[in-house]
């Protein structure tokens, strides 16, 4: 069994204390730190993976992209829009000067207005919107500091650090790209490889290819 506890570290270091408990009792206590460099790598990977996903869906016929499928999303268009819309709403939330329920309600309405099927009906328009959001995200990521990452923000009736919220957004994209991959297979199309180790093996993130 693994029990995980998190806490804000001292001296401008974001950390989580991870306690591993096994059959024989307490086995190991370790510390995990996420820095600006880690966040930059995470979002460089996210941009790379999103581009591969967009290449795959751009090869589809319009009918395939909007074909009704059973699952969390009614069609591929909606799944891709959810990924991009998720990045947009969190980024806008992080950049806001205040964080309250009224802001969240406003952002949800703005997201619906900007990412619905009438505004972004196909892969071309979704790709353009994705590039717009990713440009703003890259600017934010490049400007963030290690101290900024420690900032606590309201989320789901609690306080969560900016660093962990940024991890959430990257993880959210990965989760739903997996759904996109499944939906592509359901219509007989081939999804793109978006594994993190593939990203690294290709020489991204400062890793030299073999």
Image: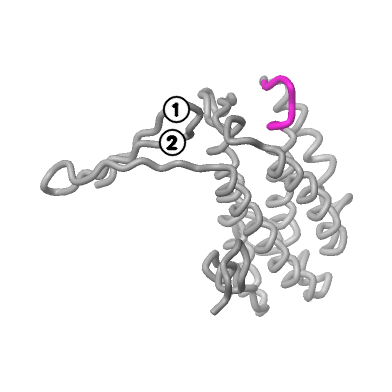
Q: Secondary structure at mark 2?
A: strand
Farthest left residue in view: 24
Q: Are marks 2 and 1 in contact (CB under 8 Å)?
A: yes
Q: What residue is drawn where x is 47% and y is 26%? A: 11
Using the numbered discs, state the Cα–Cα distance from disc 2 to disc 1 in whole angstroms: 6 Å
Q: Tag on residue 158? A: none
Q: Earlier in the sequence, mark 2 or mark 1?
A: 1
204 relative to 22, above or below: below
Read off the residue under disc 1.
8
Residue 185 image point, x, y percent: 61, 75
Q: Is residue 171 left or right of residue 48?
A: left
Q: Residues within 10 Å of mark 1 (few under 14, many from 20)?
A: some
Colouring convention used in this rendered image of the protein: one colour
Q: Residues within 10 Å of mark 2 (few under 14, many from 20)?
A: some
Which element is circle 1 on? Answer: loop
In-image side of 18 versus 145 (left or right): left
Query: Which image quadrant is residue 41 in?
Result: bottom right
Which range of residues does the magenta coloring cover? 93-99
What residue appears at the point 56 percent right and 55 percent down from the top-left corner?
175
Q: How many marks?
A: 2
From the image, tell me which residue sits under label 2.
15
Look at the image and say whether residue 94 sits in the magenta stretch: yes
User: In the image, residue 196 lies at what x, y percent?
Assistant: 54, 64
Observer-nearest of 160 and 37: 37
Question: At 55% across and 28% down in the image, what residue appears?
Answer: 156
The foreground one among 206 and 16 is: 206
Residue 159 belongs to the span the image colors magenta = no
Residue closer to the observer: 51 or 71? 51
Q: Give coordinates of residue 200: x percent, y percent.
A: 56, 67
């Amino acid at each position: 069994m693994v029990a995980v506890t998190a806490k804000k570290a001292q001296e401008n270091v974001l950390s989580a204390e991870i306690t591993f408990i096994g059959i024989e009792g307490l086995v190991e206590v370790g510390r995990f730190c996420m820095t600006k460099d880690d966040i930059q790598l995470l979002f460089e990977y996210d941009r790379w993976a999103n581009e591969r996903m967009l290449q795959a869906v751009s090869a589809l016929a319009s009918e395939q992209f909007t074909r009704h499928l059973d699952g969390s999303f009614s069609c591929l268009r909606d799944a891709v829009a959810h990924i991009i819309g998720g990045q947009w709403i969190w980024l806008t939330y992080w950049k806001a000067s205040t964080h309250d329920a009224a802001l969240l309600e406003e952002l949800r309405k703005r997201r619906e207005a900007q990412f619905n099927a009438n505004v972004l009906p196909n892969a071309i328009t979704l790709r353009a919107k994705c590039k717009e959001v990713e440009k703003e995200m890259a600017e934010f990521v490049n400007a963030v500091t290690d101290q900024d990452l420690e900032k606590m923000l309201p989320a789901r009736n609690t306080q969560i650090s900016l660093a962990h919220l940024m991890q959430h957004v990257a993880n959210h994209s990965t989760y739903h790209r997996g759904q996109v991959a499944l939906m592509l297979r359901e219509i007989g199309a081939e999804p793109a490889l978006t594994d993190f180790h593939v990203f690294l093996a290709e020489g991204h993130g400062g890793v030299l290819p073999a």
